[in-house]
Amino acid sequence: MSNTRRTFEDDDFALSELERAIYAARNYVVPSDDLRPQTLEAAREHGRDRTRVRWSRIAAVFGLFFWCFGGMLASSASGIREGFVAPFGDEVHSIATEISLQENDSFEWGLVEVFSRYRSLSGMHRFTSPENFR
């Protein structure tokens, strides 16, 4: 046995037989009338699927990006947010009581004074302690 393989190029007779067999089968293989429209529709559907997958991946990347960086921004902004939070009710009550006792006014006027001072300070300073209102 030899290690050489025979190919059609080696044998002109076998090549011509193959060509004759293919030529003889030309009338047996006939595409249907709707083959082209089916192929085009399948290609369009495949393109739509790829587009959907591409946009889904882009949306997932942006969602992950905003989730990660949004969390970082929210945690860093929590310190800033404290400056915009109004004082708690107990603090307002105690400061209003102190003001009403100092100025010999009613408690209600003490409340008015606390909120007047808070409004004037809220644009300029952060509320860090009740001493800012005294």
Image (cartoon, helix red, strand yellow):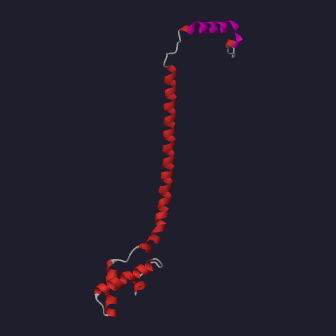
Q: Nearer the viewer, residue 120 or 9?
A: 120
Image location (x, y in percent) of residue 81: 44, 70
The residue positioned 67% from the left and 12% from the top of the image is 8
Q: Main secondary structure of the magenta part?
A: helix
Q: Nearer the viewer, residue 89 or 25?
A: 89
The residue positioned 44% from the left and 80% from the top of the image is 121
Q: Is residue 130 left or right of residue 76?
A: left
Q: Nearer the viewer, residue 125 or 68?
A: 125
Where, quadrant-wise, is the N terminus in this rendering? Answer: top right
Residue 32 shown in magenta: no
Residue 23 shown in magenta: yes
Residue stretch rendered in magenta on the structure: 9-26
Image location (x, y in percent) of residue 28: 53, 9
The residue positioned 58% from the left and 6% from the top of the image is 24
**Quick check: can you spot residue 128?**
no
Image location (x, y in percent) of residue 90: 32, 80
